Image (cartoon, helix red, strand yellow):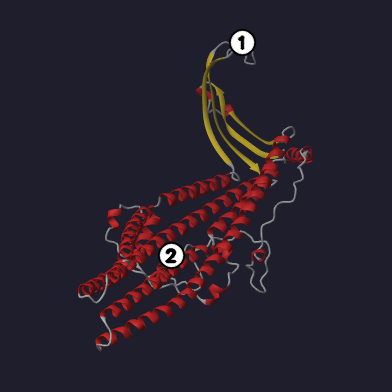
Amino acid sequence: MTKRLSLLMTAALSLVACAPVPTLKPATQAISAEQVGLASPGQAASSPAAPELAQPQAWWQAFKDAQLDALIERALANSPSLAVARARMDRAAAQVEQAQAADKPVVGAGLDMTYQRFPEHSIYPPPFAGSLRTMSTLQAGVGYDWDFFGRHQAELDTALGQGRAAQADQAAARLSLSAQVARSYLALARTLAQQELLQRQLAERKETLSLVQQRVAAGLDNGQDQRNAEAPLPELQRQSVMLDEQAAALRQQLASLSVQPASALRELAPRLPAALNLSPETQAQLGVDLLGRRPDVVAARWRVEAASSQVSLARAQFYPNISLNAFVGFSSIGVDKLLQPGSLQYGLGPSIRLPLFDTGRLRSQLHGSAAELDAAVAAYNGAVIEAVREASDQLRALQSVQSQQQAQQSALLNAEASRNLQAQRFEAGLGNKLALLSARGNALQQQRQMLDLYAQQLDTQVNLVRALGGDWQDLPKR
């Protein structure tokens, strides 16, 4: 029996040439780190292998704001988009289990009973011919599909690649959602802080108008002076209405992102937190590990691996499929004799399937898989280029904001110094109240501009964290 089985396998292998595998054009190459300026000095920039996805970071905790922590954690727990991502990951895990099962023996058992009439003109002799009897079979079987040409392994690698890509997609969705919540939260804090400064500006302007009206009544100023004092008020009032609307819209946005009614955040009044401490090294250059931190890039790379395995699977379809089947059981005419020794039956034998007349379909499948691989590599290259561009843009934006803050800080110090000088002159009886109010208003305006730049710095830092994949070297860990 063993000799016959070996001969059959040898014959099958010799027939492989009946289904020639077509030659594919050179595949699209994955972009290297050096090509996008990520390779560090002295570091090799070879074609990147599929990286392991880094553990998700609770990067927002670096702001040390319990309200922000609660909002983001609620959003991550209840977001419908994340639920979809989790379902896709579960489906990919099920495909991995299915692929793993393909390389295991299949064992089954069954009982068949058929009440039938046996014909006279057939193989059944009397007294069975022409009678009604029950045909019974009780049998167990086992089958094993030998993976000589890597078909099962390619199926498993494809499923694993798709599963890891789905896992990275979920991490990308988490990162995007947490960044959205943080940006909305910080924007609300900025809006509320601007409202406070604006109310102080309005109070200063109203006091200025009141003094000018008194001076006009006393004949010290004219109507043009009063109109000049009235002019800033409508604009400040318009800004107040705009800030109120922005605050309401941001609360609604936070409520939607965290899946709760807007009324639950009616009293939410966040304050701008301290800025993140980014090291000069982080702001000076991007490292090669950006490709491993960005979950969207990791997902794209795993799709390349899955598509490559799919090409191997399509190529393996050109080779014979060899399996071994065995069975043992009982078969009899009549239930009463089913378990008797004479009803015993068993068998063992190979099965060989050769793709002799289906090579056209197989060639199209192979060419289609190769095209999918090229598309996956192109998508990966695009993801790498976009990741580097986005991270570089955010680094430049952050450096620009910091430079603007330095200039604005000088303007603010000058305005505050002028305000303090006018306050001293007024207290000493050397200046009037209008000059003091004007200096106060100018200082408040400079404070508002400084506040906007600080809020812009925080927003840019959040965008930078997202662009870097949710982590950077000096991010505090908890």
The image position of residue 154, as x and y in percent, is 64, 48
The reply to whether residue 147 is visible in this rendering is no
Q: Quadrant of the N terminus?
A: top right
Residue 343 seen in render: yes
Image-quadrant location for residue 450: bottom left
| Residue at image point 29% right, 77% down | 437
Q: Residue furthest bottom?
A: 428
Residue 58, picture quadrant: bottom left
Image quarter where the C terminus lies is bottom left
Q: Is residue 243 above or below residue 281?
A: above
Q: Secondary structure at mark 1?
A: loop
Q: Which mark is residue 120?
A: 1
Mark 2 and mark 1: span between their CA atoms? 81 Å
147 or 258: which is nearer to us? 258
Q: Is residue 126 above or below residue 320?
A: above
286 horizontally vs 357: left or right: left
Q: Amino acid at mark 2?
A: Ala
Q: Residue at x 37, y 55 (%)?
A: 253
Q: Point out residue 310 in the picture as x, y percentages from the top left corner.
A: 64, 46
Q: Are marks 2 and 1 in contact (CB under 8 Å)?
A: no
**In front here: 364 or 191?**
191
**Residue plotted at (55% across, 32% down):** 139
Determine the image quadrant of residue 53: bottom right
Question: Left or right: where does residue 220 sit relative to residue 466?
Answer: left
- Residue 203 at what x, y percent from top left? 26, 70
- Which of label 2 and label 1 is nearer to you? 2
Q: Amino acid at mark 1?
A: Glu
> Which label was assigned to residue 156?
none
Residue to which mark 2 is pinned: 58
Q: Residues within 10 Å of mark 1 (few under 14, many from 20)?
A: some
Mark 2 or mark 1, which has the lower sequence index?
2
Q: Is 152 on the left-hand or right-hand side of 408?
A: right
